[in-house]
Image: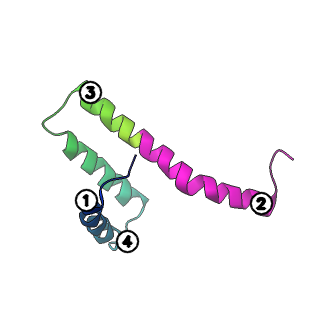
C-alpha cells in the first residue's frame, strides 16, 4: 500500500512535484519509473528483489485502478448507461 508516514511524504511530494513541472509525457514517465526501480535494485540483484519489484508494480497498478479508474468508470456508467442493461 502506498500509505507512508507523513514525514516521508513531504520529501517525496517535493521530488514528484519537481518531476511533474517538467511536463512529463508517457515515455518520460516510463523512463523515470524504470530508472527508479533499476537503481533501487542495484547491489541487491536476486530473484527475491526482482519479485518484490514486480509486486510493487502490480500493487501500484491495482491501487491506481481502485482509486482513480474505477470511480471514473462509475461516473461514465451513470452518464452513459451500464453496458449490461
Q: Residue at x 82, y 56 (%)?
A: 81
Q: Earlier in the sequence, mark 1 or mark 2?
A: 1
The residue at which mark 3 appears reads as: 48
Q: CA distance from mark 1 to mark 2?
A: 38 Å
Report the magenta residues as a range. Answer: 58-85
Mark 4 neighbour class, 10 Å CA radius: few under 14, some 14 to 19, many 20 or more:
few
Which mark is nearer the camera, 1 or 2? 1
Label 3: which secondary element: helix
The residue at which mark 4 appears reads as: 23
Which mark is nearer the camera, 1 or 4? 1
Q: Residue at x 31, y 34 (%)?
A: 52
Label 4: which secondary element: loop
Q: Residue at x 77, y 60 (%)?
A: 78
Residue 22, image x and y in percent? 32, 72
Q: CA distance from mark 2 to mark 3?
A: 43 Å
The residue at which mark 1 appears reads as: 8
Q: Earlier in the sequence, mark 2 or mark 3?
A: 3
Q: CA distance from mark 1 to mark 3?
A: 25 Å
- Residue 38 falls left or right of residue 69: left
Q: Earlier in the sequence, mark 1 or mark 3?
A: 1
Amino acid at each position: 500500500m502506498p500509505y507512508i508516514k507523513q514525514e516521508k511524504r513531504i520529501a517525496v511530494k517535493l521530488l514528484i512535484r519537481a518531476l511533474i513541472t517538467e511536463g512529463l509525457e508517457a515515455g518520460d514517465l516510463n523512463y523515470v519509473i524504470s530508472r527508479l526501480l533499476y537503481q533501487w535494485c542495484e547491489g541487491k540483484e536476486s530473484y527475491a528483489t526482482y519479485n518484490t519489484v514486480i509486486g510493487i508494480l502490480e500493487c501500484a497498478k491495482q491501487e491506481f485502478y481502485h482509486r482513480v479508474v474505477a470511480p471514473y468508470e462509475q461516473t461514465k456508467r451513470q452518464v452513459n448507461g451500464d453496458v449490461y442493461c
